[in-house]
Amino acid sequence: MLIDEQNDTQLDADEVVEESVDSDENSMKINGGDSNGAAGLLNLEELINNHLESIEKLKDELKTAREMFEDSFNNNPTYNEHIKKVQEVSKAKNSVRQEIAKQPSVATIEQKVKDLRFDIGESSKTLSDLLQDYKEQTGATSIETRKGEVLEIVSTARLVRSKSAK
């Protein structure tokens, strides 16, 4: 759970905050029209947009892979029979599920789901770093996607244990 400090509200970790923003207020600020700075900003925007699209694509793939993985179980008659008797034969149901999960095709799908989750996490971390750089360089608190959506850049903080504090 994340906290949006400006609005003092809680956000889910995977929630994208979308808001209609006056483009004059949050337009890019490029000092002195420096061509290297402008090119760098365009490159940074391109990287951000690439990561946004990549994360969206990975989430779609994850959804499909997760559905395929679950369908592998739901299409198995033995599994469905045991679901109806869950209270009486939960041990048998778990046994069948484990056997299905051992099938190479299902194990491959399960691994794909794990890989997609990992890729989404890594891409999200990189996107966060890119957005922080963009915000520092431009002072802007929003960015327009290739689809024309204006997304607000929301900074979040979290606590982690210090390696020196044992």
Image: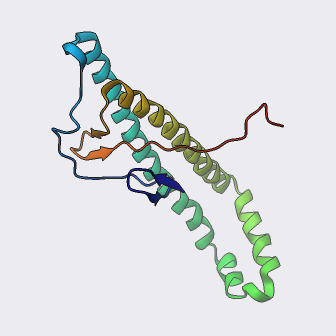
The image quarter in which residue 132 lies: top left
Residue at the spot 40% in from the left edge and 47% down from the top edge: 56
Q: Is residue 1 left or right of residue 34?
A: right
Q: Is residue 161 left or right of residue 120?
A: right
Colouring convention used in this rendered image of the protein: rainbow
Q: Is residue 43 left or right of residue 21?
A: right
Q: Please determine whether, in this image, residue 77 is positioned above or below residue 55.
A: below
Total labels: the figure holds 0
Residue at the spot 41% in from the left edge and 27% down from the top edge: 133
User: In the image shown, does 105 or 57 lie closer to the viewer?
Assistant: 57
Q: Quadrant of the N terminus?
A: bottom right
Residue ranking furthest to the left: 24
Question: Whole-percent x and y of residue 154?
Answer: 40, 44
User: In the image shown, does 51 or 140 lie closer to the viewer?
Assistant: 140
Question: Whole-percent x and y of residue 15?
Answer: 43, 55
Residue at the spot 79% in from the left edge and 35% down from the top edge: 165
Q: Is residue 111 left or right of residue 56?
A: right
Residue at the spot 69% in from the left edge and 52% down from the top edge: 104
Question: Whole-percent x and y of residue 64?
Answer: 48, 57
Q: Please determine whether, in this image, residue 69 is positioned above or below residue 46.
A: below
Question: Whole-percent x and y of residue 26?
Answer: 23, 37
Q: Quadrant of the C terminus?
A: top right
Q: Please determine whether, in this image, residue 141 is positioned above or below residue 13.
A: above
